């Protein structure tokens, strides 16, 4: 084989190899290009999808916002129209009302004096009369008014003593000025007004500070002029005064029940100057005998076959007293007790 033939074969071989390599390269390139195109397409599709979704979402929100604004504008317009209509109706009513008033349509509703124009004098007279009546109603204070407003004063002058003891009837035995009353009696009346928080109680004793009793004394009598700390009895409690401690103490004894009871009712009340007068009917009621006794005769019943509720109906046969309370700074204080019968 000649050199030329060999050279030709080598060239043919090289060409074939090159063509094979070219085909392989083109095939690889084609594959890479296809893969790249597919990837790019997928990415584009995703991007396109996201952009489309975003656009649709934005469009939807814009549409919703626009619809909301239209609804609000429509609602405001309806409210405005309604308000205008109401104002127009009010204006029409006022106008027609004025027209009717101007035409004296409402004159039939006026009283005769208003139509005749002579109400001034009558109204003035009526107003003056009404004012006078009101003033008289304020000034007039009858028995009922005094009892309702000052009846509590009777409770301030009731001695709390054992009705089986003669000493319980001390105040009812005759006329008594405050300055003449026993100190033990005054302290009994004062103790009745001591606040429960100032009374110390246990199973053994009952005690009250001297300052608390002195304060109650002043509330009942208006001053402490006749305040004299000493021993006194309240119901069945015998209080002893300790000067060093300024304290009143008594054994905590249970008071026995009694068949006798002092009954007293207000019969009348009135005022004269700065003195308030309280008239009462009083008796001793014996429950076991169903009888009333007077303070003048503790051994013979004055009325029998009666109950506690029969005091008023038998008052003429029983004792009668007058309490005098002196007014000081709009407050009434016990001044004296007078036995009327």
Image (cartoon, rainbow, N blue to C red):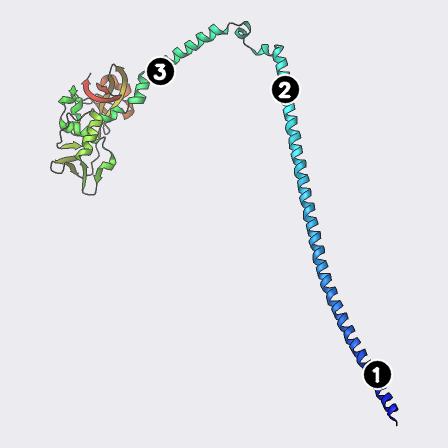
**Above-or-below relation of 9 to 45:** below
Image coords of residue 183 (percent x, y): 14, 27
Assess whether mark 3 and mark 1 are in contact (beta carbons under 8 angstroms). Answer: no
**Which one is in front, 173 or 326?**
326
At mark 2, the secondary structure is helix
Query: Residue placed at 16% from the left, 22% from the top?
Result: 178
**Numbered disc in front, either 1 or 3:** 1
Q: How far apart are marks 2 and 1 (CA)?
A: 114 Å
Location of mark 1 (residue): 15
Location of mark 3 (residue): 138
Q: Distance between the residues labelled 1 and 3?
A: 143 Å
**Which one is in front, 217 or 107?**
107
- For label 3, count other residues whose C-alpha is less than 10 Å away and answer few (under 14), some (14-19) or many (20+): few
Residue found at the very far front of the displayed protein: 3
Query: Residue placed at 17% from the left, 34% from the top?
Result: 210
Query: Residue placed at 18% from the left, 25% from the top?
Result: 223
Image coords of residue 335 (percent x, y): 19, 20
**Numbered disc in front, either 2 or 3:** 2
The answer to whether residue 319 of the structure is visible from this angle is no
Location of mark 2 (residue): 93
Q: So how many labels did they put on this image?
A: 3
**Which one is in front, 23 or 137?**
23
Quadrant in the rendering for residue 31? bottom right
N-term-proximal mark, 2 vs 1: 1
Query: Residue placed at 25% from the left, 37% from the top?
Result: 197
């Amino acid at each position: 084989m000649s050199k030329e033939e060999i050279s030709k074969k080598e060239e043919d071989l090289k060409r074939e190899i090159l063509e094979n390599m070219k085909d392989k390269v083109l095939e690889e390139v084609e594959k890479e290009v296809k893969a790249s195109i597919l990837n790019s397409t997928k990415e584009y599709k995703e991007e396109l999808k996201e952009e489309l979704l975003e656009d649709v979402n934005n469009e939807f929100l814009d549409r919703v916002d626009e619809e909301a604004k239209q609804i609000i504008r429509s609602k405001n317009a309806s409210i405005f129209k309604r308000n205008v209509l109401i104002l127009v109706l009010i204006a029409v009513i006022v106008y027609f009302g004025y027209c009717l008033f101007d035409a004296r349509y409402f004159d039939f509703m006026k009283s005769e004096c208003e139509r005749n124009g002579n109400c001034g004098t009558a109204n003035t007279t009526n107003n003056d009369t009404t004012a006078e009546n009101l003033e008289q109603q304020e000034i007039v204070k009858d028995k009922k008014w005094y009892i309702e407003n000052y009846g509590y004063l009777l409770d301030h002058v009731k001695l709390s003593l054992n009705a089986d003891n003669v000493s319980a009837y001390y105040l009812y035995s005759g006329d008594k000025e405050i300055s003449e009353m026993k100190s033990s009696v005054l302290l009994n009346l004062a103790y009745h007004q001591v606040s429960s928080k100032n009374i110390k109680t246990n199973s053994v004793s009952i005690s009250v500070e001297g300052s608390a009793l002195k304060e109650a004394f002043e509330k009942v009598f208006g001053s402490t002029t006749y305040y004299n700390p000493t021993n006194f009895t309240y119901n069945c409690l015998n209080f002893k005064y300790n000067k060093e401690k300024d304290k009143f103490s008594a054994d905590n004894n249970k008071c026995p029940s009694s068949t006798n009871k002092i009954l007293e009712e207000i019969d009348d009340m009135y005022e004269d100057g700065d003195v308030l007068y309280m008239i009462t009917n009083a008796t001793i009621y014996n429950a076991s005998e169903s009888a009333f006794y007077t303070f003048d005769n503790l051994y013979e019943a004055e009325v029998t076959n009666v109950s506690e509720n029969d005091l008023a109906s038998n008052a003429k046969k029983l004792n009668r007293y007058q309490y005098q309370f002196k007014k000081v700074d709009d407050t009434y204080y016990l001044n004296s007790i007078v036995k009327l019968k």
